[in-house]
Amino acid sequence: MKVAFVGKGGSGKTTLSSLFTRHLAARGLPVVAIDADINQHMGVALGLDEDRAAKVPAMGERLPEIKDWLRGDNPRVSSTSAMVKTTPPGAGSRLLRVGGDDPVHALGQDVGGATLLATGPFNDDDLGVACYHSKTGAVELYLNHLVDGPGEYVVVDMTAGADTFASGLFTRFDLMFLVAEPTRKGVGVYRQYTEYARDYDVAIAVVGNKVQGDADLAYLREHVGDDLLTWLGQSAAVRAVEQGREGVALEDANTAALDTMLAAVDARAKDWEKFRRQAVEFHLKNARSWANRATGEDLAAQVDPDFRFPVAYAG
Ligand SMILES: Nc1ncnc2c1ncn2[C@@H]1O[C@H](COP(=O)(O)OP(=O)(O)OP(=O)(O)O)[C@@H](O)[C@H]1O
Ligand SMILES: [Mg+2]
């Protein structure tokens, strides 16, 4: 199950994606966490010290190797440089399994039972559609080639703001968590995000964060209505971790919120046909807007009309 955390800067995306990752790992569930934010903070939030966190290899710097491995002997992809971030898998491509034995997961760092992958730091130039060398392109390729089943999780800490929606990346998720503080700014992006998501039939659930008391909760309910899945309070445990203290257990109410989030993910039915169709749709869009020009090829020819994901799982 592919899950993203989005929201305003400072809303708590890194905190909640890391808490959620720990929650899954503590239950022995297979989970890959991906730090896909401009500034890379997930490693530390997951409990790595700064040095080790800085040493997690950047997927964005291994793009040629990643592309080369994924394209395998797919005859529709003429060369590694003709493989762009949206190139969909086809006959001959290699596919990924959560935590599999492959060169992509080999870049990962084990943190408390979860595998941490990182795009590496990037800047504004890496965002948007016109990004041949984009760092988040590595995540898009990863998700496009990943055959995950129920009970397997990929948790992506996304960059703040609507740039998330500038590429097809946001359509790769089974569920997006929109982290919202009970403030005007916090709920300000709600309408925009949910409209984007609905246009592409992407499931989105609002998770309130730093909620203090009934007035905060009423405020969230007033602004996001039934899209409010659950909420976390202002957490002394989160603050204690930020202060460098260890072994502080998360409050029961906040743990219960993580359980609700997990149940919401597990309740999503996989739709591999939609996943495949949208990959093709965004690839063709990408090809027309810049990738054909950048590679000097007609990349529509990379689409394998007969390809289907080999889904050996129920659901
Ligand atoms: N529930 C919470 N209780 C207490 N502190 C919190 C909570 N959630 C987040 N914080 C604190 O709020 C700050 C911002 O959180 P975080 O870094 O997770 O936000 P972000 O959305 O990832 O920000 P950015 O957009 O900069 O990546 C951090 O200091 C974090 O510890
Ligand atoms: Mg963050």
Image (cartoon, grey):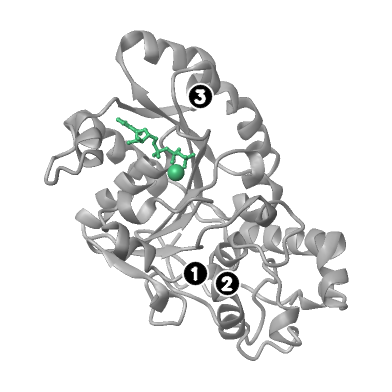
Q: Which mark is residue 309?
A: 2
Of pointers 3 and 1, the one earlier in the residue sequence: 1
Of pointers 1 and 2, the one earlier in the residue sequence: 1
Name the amino acid type tagged 2.
Answer: Phe
The number of callouts visible is: 3
- Farthest residue to the left: give it: 247
Label 1's element?
Answer: loop
Q: Which mark is residue 147?
A: 1
Q: Are marks 1 and 2 in contact (CB under 8 Å)?
A: yes
Question: Would residue 241 be visible to someone looking at this image?
Answer: yes
Q: Is residue 302 above or below residue 237?
A: below
What residue appears at the point 55 percent right and 40 percent down from the top-left corner?
A: 160
Assign the C terminus to one quadrant of the image: bottom left
Image coords of residue 293 (percent x, y): 88, 70
Report ligand 2 position as a quadrant.
top left
Q: In the image shown, does 266 or 238 lie closer to the viewer?
A: 238
Of badges 2 and 3, nearer the viewer stands: 3
Image coords of residue 71 (percent x, y): 63, 83
Neighbour class for label 1 at 10 Å: few (<14), some, many (≥20)? some
Residue for badge 3: 186
Q: Which mark is residue 52?
A: none
Of pointers 2 and 3, the one earlier in the residue sequence: 3
For the residues labelled 1 and 2, the Cα–Cα distance comes to 7 Å
Q: Quadrant of residue 89?
A: bottom right
Q: Quadrant of residue 202?
A: top right
Image coords of residue 139 (percent x, y): 55, 63
Label 3's element?
Answer: helix
In the picture, measured across the screen, residue 117 lies left or right of residue 212, that is right
Name the amino acid type tagged 3.
Answer: Gly
Of badges 1 and 2, nearer the viewer stands: 1
